[in-house]
Structures are given as C-alpha cells and as structure tokens.
C-alpha cells in the first residue's frame, strides 16, 4: 500500500462541530467514535428538524384535513422527494419508507418472494452477507422448497465473480447482494453484477446499508431492481430507512403488511389496495424519523459528499497502514476495493477484550461477529474488532486507535 502523505482538503474540524455528540468525554477521555457502520452520529440540523416536528407539527399523516396533519404530510412527502433525488430514482413513489434495511429486505423476500419464487427455484446471495440478507431468503426457501446458492469469496474477502456467472441460470429468481460488506469493508462491483444477472432476466436486490452513507449511489446508473438502506447509518435517526424498487416490480408485488393507510376500499367481502408507495406502508409510519432522514439528506447535499467520500477513503488507507504495521494484528478483509470498515484481530486476545480495553480509552469500536457469522466461519475466527469510519473522524483518532491497540497487546503480553 502506498503511504498516505497528505489528506484531502477537507475541513474536518468544521464538520465535527456539526455533531454535538462528538464533543463528549467517555471514561475521562475525548470520545473517539469508530462504530459508524453500526450507527453513525446525527448532526444538529437533523436533531433540530426532528425536534421541530415534535414541538410544532406532531400529528398523523395522510389522514387529517387539519393544519398540523397537512403540515406533517407535506414534510414527510418532501423527505421522500429528497430520497428520490439522493439516489436518483425515477419517481418518488419507487421509494418506500421502511424501518431500515432489515425491514426492506424482509418486505422483498415476503412480497416478491411469495409471488415469484417457487419449488426448485434458486436465490443467489453471497458469502459476505449480513444476516438480514440471508435469513429472510432462507425462510422463503424453506417455505417454497427453493434453494439458496452462495457466491463464494476469496482470502482477501472479494467475491469470486467467475463463480457468480456460473451460478446464474434459468432457475435463479433473484440475486441479493451487499454493495459494501459490513464485516470486511469490501466494495462489490454491483453494477457489473446487475448487468450479468439481467442477461439471465434475473432481478437484483442491493443491500446498500454500508454504501449509501459513504459514497453517492445512483439506482438508475446501477440499474438496481431493489436497493435498501437504513437512515441511522447515514446521519439520520433510527426507525427510518428506504426500500427502492423499480415501479415495474413494485406494481406486480402484493402488500407486505396490511391495515390502515394502504387501502383504496374495504368491505367485509373484499379490499382493494392503494397504489405506490402507500401499498407498502401500512399503519402509521415513523414520521419524525422519516422527516429526519430528509434533513440528513439536506445535510449531505450541503457538504460536498464526494469530497467526504474521498477523505474517508484516505482515512481508511491511513488506518490500514497504521494497524497492519503492528505486530500481532491481523486485518480481516483486504479487498482491493474497500470502504469505511477495518476489521482486525489481535493474536491471543479475544475481540471482546479488545473492545472493552479500547472503550477505557474512550474509543468506540464494535467487537463480535457483526451479524455476519458465515464471514467469521470463512476466516476461521470467532469474531473481530471493527473500526468503521465516517467523514468526521480524524487522523489523530486513528493514531489514538493504534496507540490503544499497542496497549491491548501490552496488557495481554
Ligand atoms: N449492520 C453493523 O454493525 P438494520 O439493522 O436493519 O439497520 O441494518 C441491517 C444491516 C443489513 N445489511 C448490512 C450490510 C448491514 O451492515 C446492516 C447493519 C450493523 O454492521 C448492525 S448489525
């Protein structure tokens, strides 16, 4: 790896000032927040927007003729328009609000799956998927007598693409694959993978939980059929998330949940459903969170997101260089294309102990299997410690991480 000499021209201190949580101390030390892949922090403008809704606009949406309800409905639908522009969907109604990535994938597995997947069919996922992109398909496969096929990975943690092409056939009913692996940081070449699947007439779902927060994603450029992500990993509150789906698919799919808000007419004999997006949004949604997601997108649009992505990438390279130079540290996931995530182990130290000792220095990392147990099995480790970066992290924080890792090694020597 080439040495990183200078960081991009990115005013990280100015950005940090937007995130109040970052100025706290933890265990008497300044907080070093390196658990962004689990949940990123929320800027003041997003906090303020959520608070404004709760203080001045709180009411149910799509239901009331009164002032507050109309105000809240306008704000919520404006957030959907922002999502549409952010991911370059053709139409706002292709953007379904969900609680997060997990719910988005479950929706597709339930709705698309129950309509289009049958006995003997195949569902193609990869060996680096998060459990949220494994289990819904497993449940569907069990129910339908379908089979899960897995695109293998190599020792660097990259998909073996030749195998991918061999696994596609006329029985394949969907490909569901991560854009960026949360356990390894690998960026998968999803645009090419989608083009390959489309040659076989197979739709593709992209789990974009770890890509949308880190670099611009354009659903039309990718030609994704479905793409899902969570607000809480992209500077918005928990409870917000998006399932993007091409209208052609969503129109053909049955509702996932039923109840209020998703109907056209109801009698005891028969119900007819609303069109998109309401058909997939039964019940009262997380309104404050959805409006917050819109505010987070406004924030990302205000900061030169492409420059942020370049900065973050340089930070990842710097951290990779620092940690890989420490004797006893092993990086898990050394793909040529990576984003945000640095998973590692330390010889003879359990990752949970790494996490606990780092916490004493005020450093937040995640330790565990990262809801990707098959990845741990492949690398033959019980768990890893994982530092994951956002554009508000600094080189000094990476230096502190490296120092603290040295301390861990000393404690266990
Ligand atoms: N990964 C992590 O620490 P939810 O929980 O629905 O917002 O997202 C699920 C999910 C799906 N796919 C990927 C690639 C993910 O990274 C996640 C969430 C967190 O890595 C929590 S396990």
Image (spheres, grey):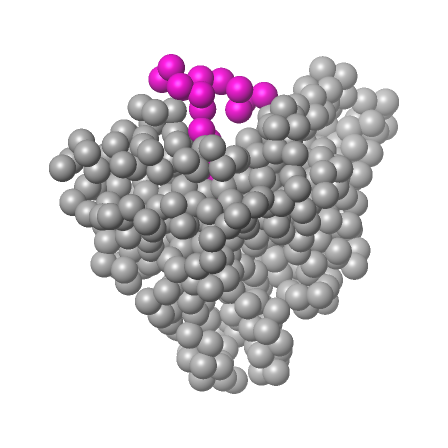
Question: As drawn, which residue projects farthest toward the left?
Answer: 413
Q: Is residue 387 rendered to the left or right of residue 71?
A: left
> Is residue 377 magenta-colored?
no
Name the image quarter holding residue 68. top right
Question: In this picture, is 352 found above or below 174?
Answer: above
User: In terms of depth relative to the viewer, which is nearer, 99 or 258?
Assistant: 99
Q: Give the residues in magenta.
A: 20-40
> Residue 186 at what x, y percent from top left?
46, 59
User: In terms of depth relative to the viewer, which is nearer, 366 or 194?
Assistant: 366
Residue pictured at 43% horizontal, 62% vertical: 335
**Quadrant in which the N terminus is drawn:** bottom left
Name the image quarter holding residue 97. top right
> Residue 86 at what x, y percent from top left?
73, 49
Residue pictured at 61% horizontal, 28% vertical: 13
> Total label count?
0
Residue pictured at 63% horizontal, 24% vertical: 17
Question: As drawn, which residue projects farthest toward the front?
Answer: 5
> Is residue 35 magenta-colored?
yes
> Residue 411 at what x, y percent from top left?
18, 31
Q: Is residue 185 rendered to the left or right of residue 40?
A: left
Question: In this picture, is 254 found above or below 346?
Answer: below
Residue pictured at 22% horizontal, 48% vertical: 328
Name the image quarter holding residue 152. bottom left
> Residue 29 at what x, y percent from top left?
40, 19
Instruction: Judge whether residue 174 can be spotted in this image.
Output: yes
**Quadrant in which the C terminus is drawn:** top left
Instruction: Judge whether residue 277 can be spotted in this image.
Output: no
């Amino acid at each position: 790896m080439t040495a990183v000499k200078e960081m991009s021209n990115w005013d990280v201190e100015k950005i940090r000032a937007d995130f109040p949580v970052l100025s706290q101390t933890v265990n008497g030390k300044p907080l070093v927040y390196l658990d962004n892949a689990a949940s990123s922090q929320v800027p003041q403008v997003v906090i303020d927007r959520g608070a404004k809704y709760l203080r001045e606009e709180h009411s149910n949406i799509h239901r009331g003729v009164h002032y507050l309800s109309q105000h809240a409905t306008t704000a919520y639908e404006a957030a959907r328009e922002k999502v549409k522009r952010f991911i370059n969907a053709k139409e706002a109604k292709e953007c379904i609000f969900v609680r997060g990535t997990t719910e988005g994938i479950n929706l597709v597995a339930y709705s698309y799956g129950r309509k289009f997947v049958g006995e003997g069919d195949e569902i193609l996922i990869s060996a680096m998927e998060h459990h949220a992109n494994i289990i819904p398909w497993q449940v569907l496969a069990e129910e339908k007598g379908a089979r899960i096929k897995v695109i293998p990975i190599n020792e660097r943690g990259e998909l073996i693409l030749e195998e991918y092409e061999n696994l596609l056939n006329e029985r394949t009913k969907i490909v569901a694959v991560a854009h960026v692996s949360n356990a390894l940081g690998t960026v998968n070449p999803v645009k090419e993978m989608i083009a390959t699947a489309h040659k076989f007439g197979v739709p593709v779902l992209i789990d974009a939980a770890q890509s949308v927060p880190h670099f611009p994603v354009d659903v039309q450029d990718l030609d994704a059929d479905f793409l899902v992500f969570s607000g809480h990993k992209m500077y918005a509150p928990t409870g917000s998330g998006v399932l993007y789906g091409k209208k052609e698919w969503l129109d053909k799919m049955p509702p996932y949940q039923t109840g209020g808000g998703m109907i056209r007419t109801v009698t005891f004999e028969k119900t007819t459903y609303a069109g998109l997006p309401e058909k997939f949004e039964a019940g009262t949604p997380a309104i404050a969170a959805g409006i917050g997601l819109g505010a987070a997108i406004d924030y990302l649009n205000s900061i030169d997101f492409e420059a942020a992505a370049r900065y973050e990438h340089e930070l990842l390279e710097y951290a990779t260089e620092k940690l890989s130079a420490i004797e006893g540290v092993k990086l898990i996931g050394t793909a040529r294309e990576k984003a945000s995530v640095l998973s590692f182990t330390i010889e003879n130290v359990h990752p949970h102990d790494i996490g606990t000792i780092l916490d004493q220095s005020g450093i937040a990392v995640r330790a565990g299997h990262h809801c990707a147990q098959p990845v741990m099995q492949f690398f033959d480790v019980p768990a890893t410690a994982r530092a994951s970066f956002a554009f508000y992290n600094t080189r000094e924080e990476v230096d502190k991480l490296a120092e603290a890792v040295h301390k861990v090694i000393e404690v266990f020597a």
